[in-house]
Image: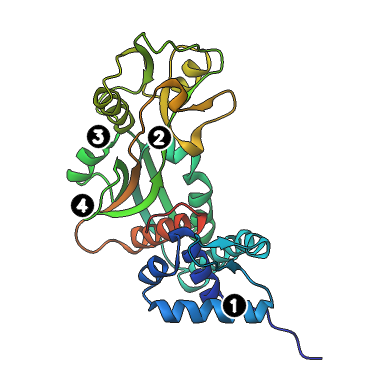
Amino acid sequence: MPTSLPPFDLDLLRTFVAIVDNGGFTRAAERVGRTQSTVSLQIKKLEENLKRRVFTREPGRELQLTPDGEILLTYARQILRLGDEARSRLMEPDVAGRVRLGTPEDFATVHLPEVLARFARAHPRVALEVNCDFTVNLLDGFSKGQYDLVLFKRELQSGAGGIGVWKEVLVWAGSPRLLLDRNEQLPLVLAPAPDVYRKAALGALDRAARPWRITYTSPSLAGLQAAVKAGLGVTVLPKEMVSAGLHILGGEQSLPDLPDSEIVLYRAAGTLPRAAEALAQHITSSLESSGQSIL
């Protein structure tokens, strides 16, 4: 008996994920380098193959996943990650050498371990040298040639160079045990200057004319979270890093909105060694398929 083929291919799945991550067909078309009509035809083909609708299309309403689309999205991300890993392992088996990567500590701790583990499995002859530091130190080291690749934080912006690989939605986070008085200075737990989150917090408070005082300073994400959980003050974190024991604060505490930030990838000038080029492509494709990429 003939073997039945899966009702989709990687190209259709990549377009499907791009639509979800970019919030619509137009931006997804720009991302995948196709016309909007081609993207629409790809989704039509995907739905025909599945015999299922993956998007709801109601005039005047935001594009939404159907229940079947939500199920497919989970598997699509896994399939794309495995496909990228297999391609790297089979098509570039001889990549070897050393790659020097700089990255912020919190991003490395939360988002990079699995990404780097998959790269190491695909390229066992590549030695990774990963250094965690503040953005200002990372950029200084990058300018001095200390890194092949560097990931760093900045306020979300366009046309500023580098490859934006991750969008961070910043929120205020605090402990339930901390009682805030709107008439008193807001106690803050922050990393030392020139941390991007610190700048975002103080800038937002100053614009809102909300008085503040810094009660605890630490360069460590774990140290900051422990201090906030103990009730020493509130802090600024990416939404996905608000851990158990903390909750997101907002308007009811008279806290101003925060600007979004982004993680950006810089590559050393000139032609990168094959190992560094492979890692750069792996990081961007892995973060893209994880769901919060801004590529």
Q: Position of residue 184 (x, y in %)?
A: 36, 8
* Colour option used: rainbow
Q: Is 275 located above or below residue 167 in the figure? A: below
Query: Between 291 and 89, which is closer to the camera in this rendering?
Result: 291
Name the secondary structure under disc 1: helix
Q: Quadrant of the N terminus?
A: bottom right
Looking at marks 2 and 4 on the same chain, the residue that comes earlier in the sequence is marked by 2
Quote the CA–CA distance across marks 1 and 2.
40 Å
Mark 3 belongs to which amino acid? Answer: Asn
Question: In this figure, which residue is indicated by the disc labeled 2?
Answer: 105
Q: Residues within 10 Å of mark 3 (few under 14, many from 20)?
A: some
Query: Between 277 and 73, which is closer to the camera in this rendering?
Result: 73
Question: In this figure, which residue is indicated by the disc labeled 3?
Answer: 137
Q: Which mark is residue 139?
A: none
Quote the CA–CA distance across marks 2 and 3.
12 Å
Mark nearest the camera among 1 and 2 is 1
Mark 2 belongs to which amino acid? Answer: Glu
Give yes or no for contact between labels 4 and 3 (Cβ–Cβ under 8 Å).
no
Mark nearest the camera among 4 and 3 is 4
Question: In this figure, which residue is indicated by the disc labeled 1?
Answer: 46
Looking at marks 1 and 2 on the same chain, the residue that comes earlier in the sequence is marked by 1
Q: How many marks?
A: 4
Looking at marks 4 and 1 on the same chain, the residue that comes earlier in the sequence is marked by 1
Mark 1 belongs to which amino acid? Answer: Leu
Q: Is residue 154 left or right of residue 167?
A: left
Looking at marks 4 and 3 on the same chain, the residue that comes earlier in the sequence is marked by 3
Q: Which mark is residue 160?
A: 4
Q: Residue 7, located in which quarter of the rendered image?
A: bottom right
Q: Residue 272, located in which quarter of the rendered image?
A: bottom left
Q: Is 163 located above or below residue 24 in the figure? A: above
Looking at marks 1 and 3 on the same chain, the residue that comes earlier in the sequence is marked by 1
